[in-house]
Image (cartoon, helix red, strand yellow):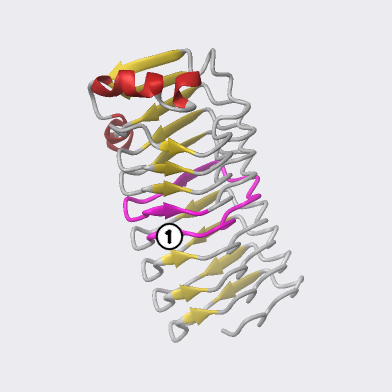
Amino acid sequence: IGGWAFSDCSSLTSVTIPNSVTTIGGWAFSDCSSLTSVTIPNSVTTIGGWAFSDCSSLTSVTIPNSVTTIREYTFSGCSSLTSVNIPNSVTTIGDWAFSDCSSLTSVTIPNSVTTIGDNAFMGCSSLTSVTIPNSVTTIGSEAFSGCTNLKKVNIGKSVKDIGEYTFDNCTSITQISSEAVVPPTCESGVFTDINKSKCKLIVPKNSLDAYKQAYQWNDFFLIEGSTTGITNTVYNK
């Protein structure tokens, strides 16, 4: 399916893509404002940037496990999207991929993902919790900025770098758990607008002193040590 193929088809309500299709081009279904459902077959290996951007009536989407990368702006502005299934074939969530999906209440990031791009979930104002799996090493700038209802964040043990303003304007966060033994390097403003006198920070027990001295992590008043795997407990539940 070529780029811009169905862009601005504002009356299109549903689409089934046949098994013969391997590529969905950039902007292919962008601004299909009445599209409520789409079936993407396992034959598809590539979904282009902006492919479903601003499909404001799309309520759910299943990405096949043949896809390895969710590109930039792929589902940006899908304001009716309440759930999304990201398969464990995906290794990269691109910049702005799910930005402004304001109805998205939950998202499961699989253990295959190593990179979460800049602004990837920015403005997902209905998200209440997020677990960054142990496979992720980098969280992009402003990745969860403006997630105003986000209350709990679990950060996996492999995260090394957190981009600037990642949790900016996340005013509802009350608990952050980090399994990283070495406190992840924080760019400027990572925890801006979080109430650091009330938000609980839970870290590995043996790393307690390291977090109390690390840049930006040391701004939290309530830092507790944990001896058990935080993220693993969440997965088991």
Residue 105 magenta-drawn? Answer: yes
| Snapshot quadrant of residue 191 | top right
The vertical placement of 76 against 188, above or below, is below
Residue 9 on image: x %, y %:
74, 75
Q: Position of residue 61 (x, y in %)?
A: 52, 60
Q: Does residue 179 appear to the left or right of 167 in the view shown?
A: left
**Residue 235 shown left or right of residue 22 in the figure:** left
Q: Whole-percent x and y of residue 197?
A: 54, 13
Magenta stretch bounds: 91-117
Query: Does 203 appear above or below 53?
Result: above
The residue located at (61%, 37%) in the rendering is: 147
| Secondary structure mostly seen in the magenta stretch | loop
Q: Nearer the viewer, residue 236 or 143?
A: 143
Query: Would you place residue 50 above or below residue 115 in this image?
Result: below
Write down the quadrant of residue 229 in the picture.
top left
Name which residue type carries label 1: Thr
State the image coordinates of residue 47 (x, y, percent, origin top left): 51, 72
